[in-house]
Amino acid sequence: MAIRTARLSVLATAILATLPFHAGAVRIDYSIDAGFERDDNVLMSPTDPQDSNALRAGLGFVLAEATSTVQANVGGRVEYWNYVDGPQTNALEGSLTGRLDWFIVPQVFSFTVEDSLEMRPIDRFAPDTSDNRQRVNVLSLGPNVQFNWSRALRGRAELRWIDTRAAETDDIESQRMAATVHAIRELNPTSVLTFSVRGQDVDYRHDIIARDHRRYDAYARYDQELRHVGVGLAAGYSWVDYADGSSASHPLLRGRLTWAPGPRNTVAVEATHQLTDASESAIAGIGDVTSVPDRLSTASITVNSSVYEEDRLEFHWTHHRQRLDFTLGSYYERIDFLDDTAFDETRRGVLAQVSYRLTPTLDLRSYADIARSEFPGLDLRTDDKRYGLGLARQWSRRWSGALHYMHYRRSGDGTFGDARQNVWYLSVTYRNH
């Protein structure tokens, strides 16, 4: 817990230091929940299923401040699992994502703090249990300088110190310095063209497997936001120079499209073709937290020190009516590591979620999550299917209860095997707003 606490305290201290001056602008939303879970195959064993009963207590929160001096948005969750019986050990887990911008000299000089804490698997080929999860924390902080060349052309320079820690995986632990310069051209009130150059120096603490390197990125980005359509396109190149003398280069392409054809529907498409790594991906994933997290932030991919080529395509369609909310999504991701010590992976899947309001205080919720992962270097494949159904009851403005059922079915080659799991979860939640 010492690693996690130290990293969280940096971001928390930075935010709390601003509160006495702008106490009226700070909003804190939180929820406290407790529940009981019954799992009939907690270790996802294909041959020896073991039951488990557990009590869970959780705290989720969102902290936001928006003034001329401070812009902050932080969301997180902490859970404690007390396993009454079964093979699992008790666990305290947490996740956090947040950003703070302190405008020391408005429109000229500012300071940014970003933090990403996720639960990641220790062994990608072992079941997702509390004994196979670790905290991975990426902290980024540094100054920004803004300057204007003309009324339509402005610049921004950023300097970042980035620290990455993991509870169990030593080879990912690193420190890096990164410097970025942006030239931003406003083409018209709805569109912007940005030219960016970035360089970073990565120093791993344990470089027996990890390879120290320098990385450079240069790209141009075009963004346009209209009433019903948003477009973003980026194109450039990335170079990696390793301390051992080897090097690699790769094109950088990113694109996004959001379309709201009417008040009830929203469509979003995002495509990426780039070089990245675990730390950079964590920082890039920090976004605005709009609701109190009711679950931990987790990811299935194993963290390591290797830079990898990433191809990703995502699609989301959201439909909203007075009593019905429906979301349909699909994704494809291919990860090709530059180092031979890591295992390449291809993932694809679809996700559907439905929520229907039976009465003003009673909601019926259901979802289906179907995914396939392939490891070409190991000649392995796994299919994961999750189906869920739940009822949520709002007892009062602040108190609610829910009963959820989840069926998980896994089929795979070799190490994975075939297994099934049924989970029931009964919970009570209190929200301050």
Image: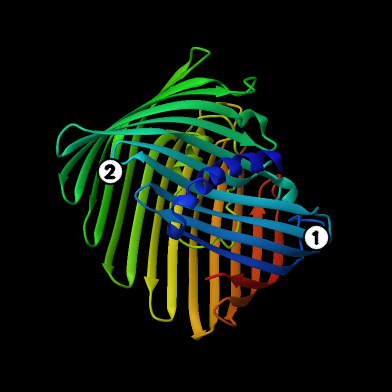
Q: How many marks?
A: 2
| Badge 2 element | strand
| Residue 116 in view of the camera | no
- Spot occupied by residue 253 in the image (x, y as percentages of width and height): 33, 38
Figure check: 169 above or below 205: below
Quadrant for residue 226, please give it: bottom left
Q: Which amino acid does label 2 sit on?
A: Leu
In the rendered structure, the answer to whether residue 151 lies left or right of residue 183 reads: left
Give the Cα distance between marks 1 and 2: 48 Å
Q: Residue furthest top?
A: 245
Mark carried by residue 135:
none
Residue 216 in the image: state x and y as whole percent: 39, 24
Quadrant (top left/top right/bottom left/bottom right) for the N terminus: top right
Residue at 65% in and 43% down = 5
Q: Which mark is residue 83?
A: 1
The residue depicted at 19 percent of the width and 51 percent of the height is: 190
